[in-house]
Every structure is written in C-alpha cells, then in structure tokens.
C-alpha cells in the first residue's frame, strides 16, 4: 500500500477518535470551519482540545476562526498540522501568538498487520473491557500511566466507551492490579491504536508492547489490515519494534499563555 493512502487512513482514524472522545464530554464543542475542525472538551489538558485541518480545503480564515473558538474556552489546546499537507496554514500561526513545539508528533502505520495471538509477559493478563469494573481498571491505569489526575481521565474516557461503535477498550492487570490501558478504534479497514499507557511501577516488562499487539491482533480479527497511531517519545521505539513506520509528521503549535496542561 502506498504511503499517501496510509497517511489518509491514519488521519481519518484520528479524526474519528477525536470525535468519539470529545462528543460525550459535557459542554464539549465540535465544529467544522472552512475545512478546519475544532474538538474542544473544555478540560484543562491540551490533548483534549485540538484544532485539526480535515483535508486540503482548510483555509487560513478557517484556521483563525477555529482557534478563536477554542481560545474562548480559556484552556490549553494545540493545533496539529501535517507536514507537507497543511504547510499553507503555517505562516498564520505565529501572528496568532502560537509557538511551535520542537518535537513533532509522528503518525505511524503498519501494513499488513499480523493477526497472530500474542502472549503477555508472565503474570500479566490483558482483558477486553465488557463492564464498568473493567473500565475502572482501564481508567486507573491510563491516569497513572499518563500521570494525569484520575477525575480528568474519567471525564475524557467516559462511562460507556467500550459500547460505542468500532471501539474496543482494554485493561491489563499484574497480580490483580491494573497496570496498563489500551484502546482500539476501527474505521473501515483501519484499526487505530490509542491510550497505550503503563503505570510507572510496571514499566520495562514489555506490557505496553503486548497491549499494542493485542489491540492490533483484535483489529485484524475484525477484518482490518492497516493499523495506525500517533506516537509519543516513550512509545516510538516500541512501535518501531512491532513494525510500525512513520508515514507523516505533525507539527504541534500551542498558546504559551495557556500552557499545555497535564
């Protein structure tokens, strides 16, 4: 499969992830302005308030209008622009008071994806969430792994995520304690991998890799043949080891007056 197709599939999946996560948050705003989408929860975390061009129709005027929407909420946010695809929008950002994060956000893809079952490390059990108790373990592990206040994680994740179309939620336990989270989102042929987090005390055991492989394998079992994700610095080498490759980088711009939150 060519890189341009993988870039498009990764972007479409990420946009759907933002919609699914943002929509249920009380008071959230989702808006499309001249090809630029706003996903604003109002929560004090930049990741939960994003401005993202949808496609090549995005305009500078739309970008400015979208940024005004999220600035009015007075919470950290960021603008994510795809290198090589959204370059026509870059010149407007410094004039709006935004600064460039020196580290890009890699968009990664894996094709074809392996469908073989994976064995987690000794003592670790990975389960798909099917009830409120399982979701509680997912939330607790995610909050600890991302070093985020648990109440914020609960609002972002919601109380019925595993019931939403195309969604698969996971929690890993070690000796009965939640130690890792994972989330898969299916859009057509694509399984998007999100919320891979391991609690600090459980890191270095291969749990995050096992969780990622489980999400991907379950996506394959549902008919997907492409896996996509956006990689953190910590996760990047793990994803490369699995076979993901960077298909596109996003530059992240933020407002220093509002910070980046947790």
Image (cartoon, rainbow, N blue to C red):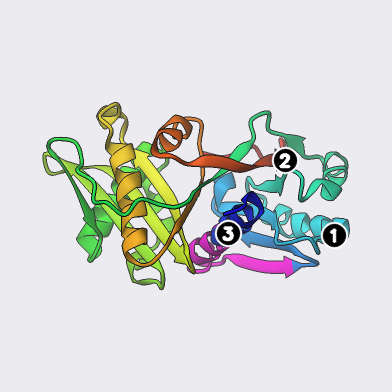
Mark number, residue 59:
1
Q: Residues within 10 Å of mark 3 (few under 14, many from 20)?
A: many
**Above or below: residue 175 compared with residue 112:** above
User: Visible in this render: residue 129?
Assistant: yes
Q: Residue at x 39, y 62 (%)?
A: 158
Question: Residue 251 appears in which quarter of the rendering?
Answer: top right
At mark 1, the secondary structure is loop
Q: Is 15 or 74 nearer to us in this picture?
A: 15
As drawn, is 8 to the left or to the right of 122?
A: right
Q: Earlier in the sequence, mark 3 or mark 1?
A: 3
Q: Residue at x 81, y 64 (%)?
A: 57
Q: Nearer the viewer, mark 1 or mark 2?
A: 1
* Residue 39, x across and y down, in percent: 62, 60
Mark number, residue 9:
3
Mark number, residue 234:
none
User: Visible in this render: residue 152?
Assistant: no
Q: Earlier in the sequence, mark 1 or mark 2?
A: 1
Give me the C-alpha separation between circle 2 and circle 3.
29 Å
Q: Residues within 10 Å of mark 2 (few under 14, many from 20)?
A: many
Give me the C-alpha separation between circle 1 and circle 2.
20 Å
Q: Is 168 or 61 nearer to us in this picture?
A: 168
In the rendered structure, which segment of residues is drawn in magenta? 14-32
* Residue 88, x across and y down, in percent: 86, 49
Q: Which residue is mark 2?
A: 255
Q: Is residue 31 magenta?
A: yes
* Residue 205, x across and y down, in percent: 25, 29
Q: Residues within 10 Å of mark 1 (few under 14, many from 20)?
A: some
Q: Is residue 177 magenta?
A: no
């Amino acid at each position: 499969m060519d890189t341009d197709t993988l870039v498009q599939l990764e972007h479409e999946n990420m946009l759907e992830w933002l919609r699914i996560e943002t929509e249920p948050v009380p008071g959230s705003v989702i808006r499309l302005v001249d090809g630029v989408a706003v996903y604003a929860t109002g929560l004090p975390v930049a990741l939960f308030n994003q401005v993202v061009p949808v496609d090549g129709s995005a305009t500078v005027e739309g970008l400015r209008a979208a940024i005004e929407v999220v600035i009015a909420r007075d919470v950290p946010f960021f603008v994510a622009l795809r290198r090589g695809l959204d370059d026509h929008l870059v010149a407007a950002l410094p004039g709006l008071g935004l600064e460039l994060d020196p580290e890009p956000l890699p968009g990664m893809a894996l094709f074809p994806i392996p469908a073989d079952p994976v064995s987690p490390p000794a003592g670790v059990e990975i389960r798909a969430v099917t009830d409120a108790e399982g979701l509680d373990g997912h939330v607790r592990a995610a909050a600890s792994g991302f070093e985020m206040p648990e109440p914020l994680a609960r609002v972002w994740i919601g109380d019925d995520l595993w019931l939403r179309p195309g969604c698969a939620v996971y929690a890993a336990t070690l000796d009965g304690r939640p130690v890792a989270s994972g989330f898969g989102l299916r859009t057509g042929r694509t399984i998007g991998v999100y919320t891979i987090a391991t609690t600090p005390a459980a890191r270095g055991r291969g749990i995050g890799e096992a969780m990622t492989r489980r999400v991907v394998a379950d996506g394959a079992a549902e008919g997907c043949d492409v896996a996509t994700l956006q990689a953190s610095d910590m996760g990047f080498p793990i994803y490369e080891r699995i076979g993901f490759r960077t298909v596109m980088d996003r530059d992240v711009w933020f407002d220093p007056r509002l910070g980046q939150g947790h």
